[in-house]
Image (spheres, rainbow, N blue to C red):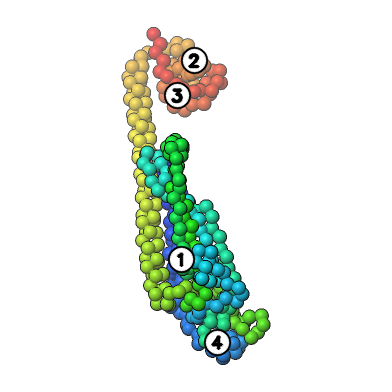
């Protein structure tokens, strides 16, 4: 419990650092894979070229073409003339919330998100290359078709209720995004022969390489990934430094506490030594009766009372070795105190 707050902070920092470093590693590997990728010439001979490869596939290639729907395209409800093959509709709620320190701030909350998709291909000349599993692409560029914001109509009661609950709605934002039919896309992935043996399919790489469907040229995509990689690199460094700082702070607190314990123990030992020396100097000389002699060594007088039994039966010297049981009644010893016998 002494390090609960630091442990929580360290755990949160470790989770954030892990996420940032994973993103940095992914961006780094994506840039490296793009550097080694090669374009393919989309022509009639491409099917024969893929068929001749081991596994009937080209592992990692770039294909560029126009989006062509392979079934009835999706029509935008907000722009009736716009047709597409992938549609994303997001509904966000805009809120004003009160923070712990009493300040009010805006935030967003996604309350609904849905994807619609139909089979489509990238058309280059007279050749169609089917795109498989588009929604699993690491990058899938969507074009914003509409972005509608509807403010909330609040009455006096809504303002009062929001003041007491700390949450006040501001409005709803509905955004529609699409991959338009006819848009020029760059696909980076695995090019394989389809089941019919006469057409081609672009699909995610089985080697775990990133799968891209983007409107950006290859060099622009590489620069974008490089910028994102640098961002996650610096974020990882900052989070790592914060984590090391928290560990150092915990180690310093531990070291400080251990030093305090050591100082207290040394102080206690000095006091016990001083007390023992004073008792020895104050010890009367001469012969002692049997009742006055220590029950253990039978040389020194009785000088220590054992609690809770209350027996005065041992001297200061013997009390250093007898710490568990009273030599008279065998009761457990909880504490020892000097005894002054008049």
Q: Which is more foreground, mark 4 or mark 2? A: 4
Q: CA distance from mark 2 to mark 1?
A: 88 Å
| Image vertical order of residue 92 relative to residue 38, above or below | above
Q: For the C terminus, give its image quadrant.
A: top left
Out of 116 and 154, give the one closest to the viewer. 154
Q: Residue 90 at what x, y percent from top left?
A: 51, 58
15 is higher (above) or lower (below) than 211: above
**Marks 3 and 2, the one that precedes in the sequence:** 2
Q: Are the two marked residues, 1 and 4, in contact with CB atoms closer than 8 angstroms?
A: no
Query: Tag on residue 144?
Result: 1
* x then y, percent, for residue 296: 49, 21
Marks 1 and 3 close (CB-CB < 8 Å): no
Question: What secondary structure is marked by label 2?
Answer: loop
Please tell me whether mark 2 or mark 1 is closer to you in this view: 1
- Residue 310 numbered mark, or none: 2
Q: CA distance from mark 3 to mark 2?
A: 14 Å
Tell me whether circle 4 and circle 3 mark residues in contact (CB < 8 Å): no
Q: Earlier in the sequence, mark 4 or mark 3?
A: 4
At mark 3, the secondary structure is helix
Report how many numbered discs are placed on residues in the image.
4
Residue at the far right: name it.
196
């Amino acid at each position: 419990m002494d390090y609960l707050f630091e442990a929580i902070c360290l755990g949160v920092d470790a989770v954030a650092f892990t996420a940032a470093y994973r993103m940095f590693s992914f961006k780094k590997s994506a840039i490296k894979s793009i550097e080694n990728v090669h374009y393919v010439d989309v022509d009639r001979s491409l099917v024969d070229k893929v068929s001749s490869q081991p596994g009937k596939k080209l592992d990692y290639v770039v294909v560029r073409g126009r989006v062509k729907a392979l079934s009835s395209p999706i029509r935008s409800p907000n722009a009736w003339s716009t047709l597409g093959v992938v549609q994303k509709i997001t509904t966000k709620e805009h809120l004003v919330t009160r923070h712990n320190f009493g300040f009010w701030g805006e935030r967003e909350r996604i309350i609904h998100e849905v994807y619609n998709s139909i089979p489509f291909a990238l058309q280059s000349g007279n050749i169609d290359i089917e795109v498989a599993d588009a929604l699993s692409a690491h990058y899938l560029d969507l074009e914003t078709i509409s972005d509608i914001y509807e403010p909330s109509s609040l009455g006096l009661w809504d303002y009062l209720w929001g003041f007491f609950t700390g949450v006040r709605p501001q409005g709803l934002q509905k955004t529609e995004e699409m991959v338009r039919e006819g848009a020029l896309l760059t696909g980076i992935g695995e090019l394989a022969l389809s089941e019919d043996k006469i057409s081609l399919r672009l699909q995610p790489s089985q080697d775990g390489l990133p799968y891209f469907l983007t409107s950006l040229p290859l060099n622009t995509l590489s620069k974008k990934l490089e910028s994102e990689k640098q961002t996650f690199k610096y974020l990882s460094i900052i989070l790592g430094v914060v984590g090391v700082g928290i560990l150092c702070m915990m180690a310093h607190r531990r070291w400080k506490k251990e030093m305090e314990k050591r100082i207290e123990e040394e102080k206690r030992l000095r006091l016990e030594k001083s007390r023992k020396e004073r008792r020895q100097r104050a010890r009367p000389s001469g012969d002692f009766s049997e009742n006055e002699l220590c029950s253990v060594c039978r040389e020194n007088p009785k000088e220590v009372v054992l609690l809770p039994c209350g027996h005065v039966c041992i001297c200061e010297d013997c009390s250093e070795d007898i710490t568990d049981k009273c030599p008279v009644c065998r009761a457990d010893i909880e504490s020892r105190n000097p005894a002054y016998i008049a």
